[in-house]
Amino acid sequence: MKKYTLVIIAFLLVTSPIRTAAQRLSNPLGIQLQLSGGFGDLRAGHYHAGIDIRTQSSEGHPLLAVLDGYISRVTVSPGGYGLAVYVTHPVDSLITVYGHLQRFTPTMADIVKEKQYEKESFSVDISFQPDVIPVNQGDVIGYSGNTGNSGGPHLHFEVRDLRTNELIDPLPFYQSQIPDTQKPIIRALRIYPMEGKGMVNGSDKKQNIEFGFDKNGNPVITKTIEAWGEIGLGIRAIDRMNGTNFSYGIKDILLTVDSIELYRSYIDRFSSDESRYINSHTDYEEWSKNRSFYIKTFTDAGNKARFVASRNSGKITILEERIYNAVITLTDLYGNSCQANIKITGKKQEITPPDTVGSTLLRWYDYNTFSAKGIRMTLPRNSLYNNLYMHYRVSPNSPTSPSSPTSPIHQLHPSPVSLHYPAQLSLFIDSVLPSIKPNQYGIVRINLNDGRRTWIGGVYRDGWIDAQINELGAYTVACDLNPPKITPIDPLRWRNKKKISIRISDDLSGISSYKGEIDGKYALFEYDSKNALLTYAFDDERLHPGAHHLIMTVTDRCGNQSEYHFDFTR
């Protein structure tokens, strides 16, 4: 059991300069702060690394340096943070990050454009020395927007520890400016018998716990829970804040059983390499199938996230025929909290042994290999979160076209299993077709619920395809023979709009690269990946009045290529 007092004291000693800075970080926007996303919120495959600050459903708000420092980095990407500015604050041992910008300041925009033309690439990553672009607290460093993987106009704001590059919750810096009297809400409870070690109500399957609510909004269990052996609990929950309909993650989760603390997670900082532990912290199968997050109040053997502490890994051991009183308490930064009191009746039940027939045992801490006809797989150490009896099966695959390769569907386990580190997967192509180039083959993951295919890719090797995978699921080999599609948007109005707009798409492997040329010279097309949209704003320095010829070339990940030609007049 971790000693929380010692951990907190050590944290205070290490982060004292940061806590001093917290008292004087200024507002990064010149408007009232209101959040649409919180630090540590649960996202697909990661924890949210900052806070999302609303910008009144509009773009173009000035972004202000929150402390003295210097701009140390700017990035441009079609996804991710889109346009982003990084400011280093050496005196305060912090880095602040501003994401999804609409545009940079004019000086920075000129620097970025010069680098983009130099590299002939929209995506750039530029670093600066401390004396190049110094900033004072309150200086404008850019303008808010909606670029990258953003679902609407807002500022994604991060605070990082300069010494460790750990991500720190920015909300304590602004707690006095953002009121919150709303407590977390528990939406569902779940109980998990540990495989081969526990039973609940005569079953070894996870089950939802039925409940109602008392007058204070706390869950009240409505049915008897009888269990034996080793079990765990899970919750589906959200937090709320004043004046919004947005939902947020849970800051502090505490599980006690008979007044003994078994589990606690408190997310106030984490490193980027801990973010993938979300797939162990939550019920990964539930997320994969239903896009719903259940947080487990017990830890897997391979979960090394430092913001979690537990006794007996948070698992409840029931070996007496009596009532066990479990309490889950959820608390936000402001001290608002809710509780679920769960009475579990110890009742002896015969425990179902794990299903090991025909399985392959993969140990979470070990280097594992698996092979069968047409498949080879290797898993590095610590890639699994628990030991797994993997049940492999193979089934025929119906080719999607006469030109498709022949390869069966290899199902590595009945349910999806997340891997912390990628596994190397090799699949054999039963019938290599001479009409298909080696780089047009690739591994695809198949969603067995709806048949949807996700391109993984890989490298062709003597009839095999080698690729890396991040989960155990169903895989086969496919080929991508179709070039990307290039669709001009209203080209006859480009002259009046002073802008060229083109939509690009690919039906399987995805876009790898694109290049726009006007009169044989590189033209900077901005790429908005969430809308699959390329745009070129007429550049007075590079595009003079008169007739011009555009060539747009788009290539997918298999090397298939399309070209679009168009003559236009400025």
Image (cartoon, grey):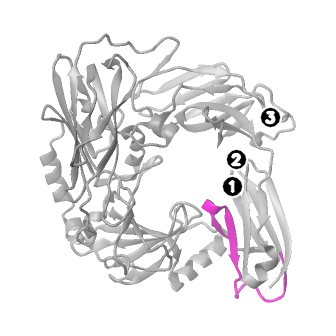
Q: Earlier in the sequence, mark 1 or mark 3?
A: 3
Within-10-Å neighbours for mark 3: few <14, some 14–19, many 20+: some
Instruction: Answer with the quarter of the image where residue 190 lies.
Output: top left
Residue designated by label 3: 404
Q: Identity of the amino acid at label 2?
A: Ser
Query: Which of the two discs, 1 and 3, sits closer to the camera?
Result: 3
As measured in the structure, the alpha-carbon distance from the residue carrying label 2 to the one carrying label 1 is 9 Å
Within-10-Å neighbours for mark 2: few <14, some 14–19, many 20+: many
Place of residue 75 in the rendered image (x, y in percent of width and height, measured from the top left):
52, 68
Residue designated by label 1: 512
Q: Is residue 540 magenta?
A: yes
- Count of numbered badges drawn on the protein: 3
Q: Give the residue displayed 77% in from the left and 28% down from the top.
A: 406
Q: Is residue 103 above or below residue 450?
A: below
Q: Nearer the viewer, residue 388 or 380?
A: 388
Helix, strand or loop at mark 1: strand
Helix, strand or loop at mark 2: loop
Asked if marks 1 and 3 touch (Cβ < 8 Å), the reply is: no
Q: Give the residue displayed 80% in from the left and 27% down from the top.
A: 431
Query: Is residue 132 visible in the rendered structure shown here?
Result: no
Place of residue 20 in the rendered image (x, y in percent of width and height, measured from the top left):
19, 70
Q: Give the residue displayed 32% in from the left and 18% down from the top.
A: 197
Place of residue 237 in the rendered image (x, y in percent of width and height, measured from the top left):
34, 46
Residue designated by label 2: 509
Region in magenta: 526-549
Q: Identity of the amino acid at label 3?
A: Ser
Q: Is residue 414 above or below residue 477?
A: above
Q: Is residue 289 above or below residue 360?
A: below
Check residue 488 in the rendering and tell me which mark sits there, or answer none.
none
Asked if marks 2 and 1 touch (Cβ < 8 Å), the reply is: yes
Helix, strand or loop at mark 3: loop
